[in-house]
Each structure stands twice: as structure tokens, then as C-alpha cells.
Amino acid sequence: LTGRRSDGARHIVHIGDVPFGADPFVVIAGPCAVESAEMISRAASSVAELGANVLRGGAFKPRTSPYSFQGLGMPGISMMHQAARAQNLPFVTEILSEDVVDELAEQVDAFQIGARNMQNFALLEAVGRTGRPVVLKRNFGATLTEWLLAAEHVARAGSSNIVLCERGIRTFGDETRFTMDLAGAMWAQEQTRLPVIIDPSHAIGIPHLLARAAAAALAAGLDGIMVEVHPDPEQARCDADQALTVPAFKELMAHLERFAIVR
Ligand code: PEP
Ligand code: MN
């Protein structure tokens, strides 16, 4: 299902009306978490104005510590829905539990399966059955083959609208948050007909390196990026250290623009 087509044809995945896997390179941007209606609308209008194609933001957050902010839950989904529609952007948001699949399927333009749930097969199947597009992140301890087989679970359940997202793997150093596996993403793209994007925010975690990482993804022929942008990173309730400010996101977009001309 996710295998390479002998004619080399790519499977184009639409999130809203935004195509992944065709030109142009797609930019998904937004905060780690939806923190309030006001905050997500500010974030949405800033990234829309700077040319992002899809809004991101989590209402259900898979936090390492149970004492950290867990997200606003369903009210956060409605806030995001409103903010996205006001900017005419589709949005993607993470789902953590099968219990809310049907409820969310009615509202979201795409489901995000986070790194920690990459092999939660019951969740993959439940999401697949809805037929909605899925952004499937690679677990930080998963091989590329395990990642592709996770996509196969979604596809077999009923949705081949899958965007693969490399978000960094765990290696022996911690100077960058994870290790961005650019070559692995290229390999995955070559082995399947699915679009493949990179999330340098989680992979690297260092805001001033993200513009060059994004350009590297573009130069590598990948299909897009996902980045975290916050209207006021110092106040962020989740992943504050890695969020781009709006001016930094503007620079990232300008940097991509320079490379897009060369491409
Ligand atoms: C996120 O996108 O905010 C997130 C939790 O990502 P990951 O699942 O890659 O850690
Ligand atoms: Mn995050």
C-alpha cells in the first residue's frame, strides 16, 4: 500500500486543499500547544501572513511528565478550528486516544500521530478507518522500516492519505534535542510513494538552526517541514525553548525562498 510504484509516481496527499508530494514545498507552522483562543488566533494570523500553508497546534499533549501542561483538550480543538478557518488555513492536530477519533474526525483537517504513538496500532487503525489525512511522526527509537510499517497499518485500515514526518531520533549526544535524520527521510521518500516532511523543531530544538535545517530539507527534495512558532515563546506552556518567534519564522521563510529559486 505504501510501497514504491514501479512507474515512480508519487501519491499526492491533500490536507484541506494543500497538496503534499507535489511542488511546492509545504510549510506547516504553529505553536506546540493551543493555550487560549486569543493565542491560537494570533499565531494563526502571524503564520498565515508569512506564507505558512497549514496550521499546527496540540490540544492533547503527550507530555513526558504528568505534572506538565496536558493541553486544553476538546475546547482547544474548537479554538484551533476557529483560528484556522478565520485565516483560511487547514490545520493538523495530535490525537492521543481512540476514544475521541470520531469526534475529532468531524473537525480536523488532518490527524497527527505523535512519535510516542507511532506503534499504537489500535490508534493507527482507528484513525485510518476515518479516511482522514494523517501526519505520521517517526518514533525517536524506531527504524525506518518500523515507521513505514506503522504507515501500512493506517493504510490497511482505510487511509492512504499519509504524510510521513521525521522528527529526530535518539543517538548518543544531547547537544541537539534529538538527531535529525535527513538521510533517513530521503530513504523513506525513495522507498514509498508517500510525501515525507521534516520537523526540525523537535529534531534539533535550537531555534537559530531551524532556517538552515528547513533549507536542507528543501534541498534534499523532501516535501515540506513542520515548525513550532509562538507569538511569545517565553510564555509558552510547552516546548518554550525551541519555538521560533514570529520574526524568526519570517527569516526562515525568507531563507527558504532563496533556496526555492535555486531549486
Ligand atoms: C509535537 O508535534 O508537538 C510533538 C509532541 O511531537 P513529537 O510527537 O514528534 O514529539
Ligand atoms: Mn512540541
Image (tube, rainbow, N blue to C red):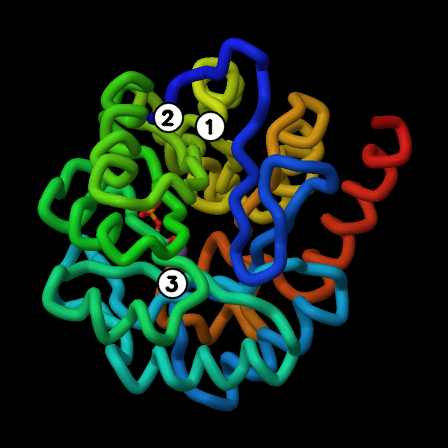
Residue at image mark 3: 93
Q: Residues within 10 Å of mark 1 (few under 14, many from 20)?
A: many
In the image: residue 115, left or right of residue 24: left
Quadrant, the N terminus: top left
Which tag is nearer the camera, tag 3 or tag 1?
3
- Quarter location, residue 240: bottom left
Q: Nearer the viewer, residue 236 or 100?
A: 100
Identified by mark 3, the residue type is: Thr
Q: Which mark is residue 180?
A: 1
In the image: residue 221, left or right of residue 202: right
Is mark 2 in CB contact (under 8 Å) with mark 3? no
Identified by mark 2, the residue type is: Thr
Residue at image mark 2: 2
The picture places residue 159, in percent across and down from the top left corner, at 33, 45
| Mark 3: C-beta under 8 Å from nearest atom of ligand 1 | no
Can residue 167 be seen here? The reply is yes
The picture places residue 90, in percent across and down from the top left corner, at 55, 67
Quadrant, the C terminus: top right
Q: Nearer the viewer, residue 108 or 187?
A: 108
Q: Which mark is residue 237?
A: none
Residue drawn 45% across the image and 40% down it: 163
